[in-house]
Image: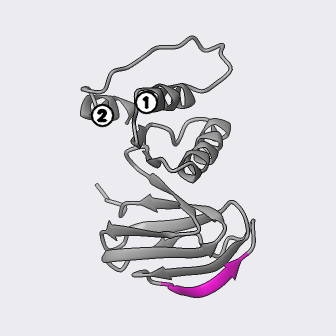
Amino acid sequence: SDDSLVAQHQNVPRQTHPPAKDATDGELAIAEAVERGAAEILLVGGLGGQMDHAFAHLMLLLRLHGRGLKIMMTSGHEEAWPLIDETVTLELEQGSRLSVLPVSDLIGLSITGVRWPLDARDVALGSTLTLSNEASGGEVAVSLARGMGVVLVYPPFQQG
């Protein structure tokens, strides 16, 4: 929940902004962090909520990563990493769900350490081929020769 994220990151300075503004709170927070010299950013709470805001934050994630900033996002229940012509390596629990959202055509996409691996596969923008894969447990590598996407990870579902 948002309250648990706030408690977990209580040492991070917070700013409050009026609802009527020309940028999201997430974009304003990132701009402040970059202005203060941050080279690495964890955007907490940038996913979830309104779809338009979540989508905009994912695009912002890609834009800033393309400029050399190390950045990722988390809601506490899902995490997002940018993927631009590179390899993203993650340590994931067995059963974690993993999706790669194409933001452009993906050329030469390989995914290892998952139930349904891919090897140098081309994936068109708008394809659902790369949704809801499952981590085998341990290292998962997502490699992309050319293109842009977002790697989304969901921890295993816990029944309770």
Residue 130, percent from left and from top: 60, 73
Residue 98, percent from left and from top: 47, 67
Q: Nearer the viewer, residue 84 or 35?
A: 35
Tell me if 35 is positioned left or right of 93 in this view: right
Residue bounds of the magenta highlight: 116-123
State which tag comes first along the sequence, 2 or 1.
2
Callout 2 crowding tier (Cα within 10 Å): few <14, some 14–19, many ≥20:
few
Q: Is residue 158 above or below residue 106?
A: above
Q: Secondary structure at mark 1?
A: helix
Residue 33: numbered disc: 1
Tell me if 93 is positioned left or right of 51 in this view: left
As for residue 64 lying within the magenta part, the answer is: no
Residue 146: numbered disc: none
Residue drawn at point x = 32 percent, y = 59 percent = 159
Residue 122, percent from left and from top: 69, 81
Residue drawn at point x = 55 percent, y = 85 percent = 118
- Displayed quadrant of residue 5: top left
Magenta stretch: dominant secondary structure: strand
As for residue 120 lying within the magenta part, the answer is: yes
Callout 1 crowding tier (Cα within 10 Å): few <14, some 14–19, many ≥20:
some
Q: Name the kind of residue labelled 1 in the image.
A: Ala
Residue drawn at point x = 37 percent, y = 36 percent = 1
Q: Name the kind of residue labelled 2 in the image.
A: Ser
Q: Quadrant of the C terminus?
A: bottom left
Q: Secondary structure at mark 2?
A: helix
Q: CA distance from mark 2 to mark 1?
A: 22 Å
Q: Where does label 2 land, which residue?
A: 4
Residue 11, percent from left and from top: 24, 26
